[in-house]
Image (cartoon, rainbow, N blue to C red):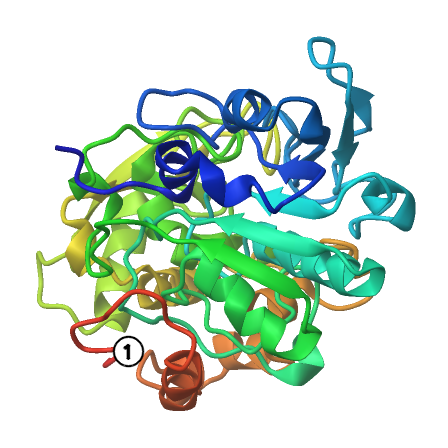
Amino acid sequence: MPSYRCGLEAWIANPRISESWGRCGLLCNQASVTRDFEPAWDVACRLLGPRLKALFGPQHGFYGTAQDNMIETGHARDPRLGIPIYSLYSETRLPTPEMMDGIDTLIVDLQITGCRIYTWKATIAACLRAAARDGKRVVILDRPNPVGGEILEGRVLDVDSTSFVGEFPIPMRHGLTAGEAALFFNRSIKAGLDVVPLEGWAAGSFWNSLERPWVLTSPNLPTIDPVHVYPGLVILEGTNISEGRGTGLPFQFVGAPFIKQSAHLVERVRKLLHLPAGKHPPGLFLREASFEPTSGKWMRKSCNGIQVHVLDPSKVRSFDFAVALVRACFELSDGAFAWKDPPYEYDLVTLPMKLIIGSQKADQKFLAPDFSIHDPFWHEGHEAYAGDAGNILIYPRSKGLVAFQS
């Protein structure tokens, strides 16, 4: 028996649930598949027939081929179905009235990563806003949170640091499924919303235990290992440290030319995390490594650093590890460390690191003379968020949403 059934598979098992959906659009990408790899658009075509009027794609494009940070994709027409494919990462990130005009229900089937930074949650919120504006309905075909639905990491977003990588007060590792996130957002948006829930999913489980392959959601999350550390290592996007883009191991290779010796970086991270000699961050192994990106930061430059190996996803706490990693690179850089300049995900003026961490104090905290990984700043707001989000949870949590304990 399958370990669980995703929302798309639940729809296949009970196709009558879509009888009231009327004319439909479908937001998905190539990762929106069944256990047997049937694409969501084929399922929708089979179950809806001529009622399927339009397809929509998120960041990285309908087929998941585009790179990161404001690399837009254009609109197209599906050659087989003869219906439009609208890009929601183009000149608009909000479905326009013209896009919504021919549909009654916008079906959303997106495999989120469990990290606030990943822009698909902002796209879901945009779909809810468009539906509220135009009197339409949104149906979420839910999928698991691949990094588990119980553990929280990273501070809750401050209201003065909102952007396309964070519109709502949630932490970096937020513990919600796409359906639960939509319910959380919709408390203020108030669109017509239904969730086709997961069946048989345990919120405390991780993707590795779900007995199905990972289909890359975007070019730089090609396997499940980088997904487990993405809620932490994504903060490297706000620096001049390579996060491994342009290599075969994005979000696993980390480094820069100004790191003179990889061993010094590993040792400095260990000390900042207060780990005993020879120990590695929980669930991880940090292997000294060198690499040369073929694109992105430090293209065709030899970088010293580490390869992050995921040994036990249930123990991984990638956010603290990544905070210590950024600080260690700063301390070892001999003045070469730098913040990434704007623009970042359509914010043209704010320092990207402030948007990524979700606080206008982020850059100061990283470079503070009294820096500490135990500073409450890094995980501020968990208790209030856990109580607030607890009101919309669809799936039981044995311990609720667990605030991070440093």
Name the image quarter holding residue 386: bottom left
From the image, which quarter does the C terminus lie in? bottom left
Number of numbered discs on residues: 1
Closest to the observer: 311 or 387? 387
Residue located at (51% from left, 59% from top): 334
Q: Extreme right residue here?
A: 98
Say if 14 sits above or below 330 in the image. Answer: above
Residue located at (14% from left, 49% from top): 312
Residue 356 image point, x, y percent: 58, 64
Q: Secondary structure at mark 1?
A: loop
Is any atom of residue 375 visible in this view? yes
Closest to the observer: 281 or 160? 160
The residue carrying pointer 1 sits among few (fewer than 14), some (14 to 19) or many (20 or more) residues within 10 Å by Cα, namely some
Residue 383 image point, x, y percent: 36, 89
Residue located at (74% from left, 47% from top): 104
Amino acid type for the residue under numbered disc 1: Phe
Is any atom of residue 306 visible in this view? no
From the image, which quarter does the N terminus lie in? top left
Say if 99 sits above or below 320 in the image. Answer: above
Q: Please name the residue that numbered disc 1 is placed on.
A: 404
Residue 117 image point, x, y percent: 55, 58
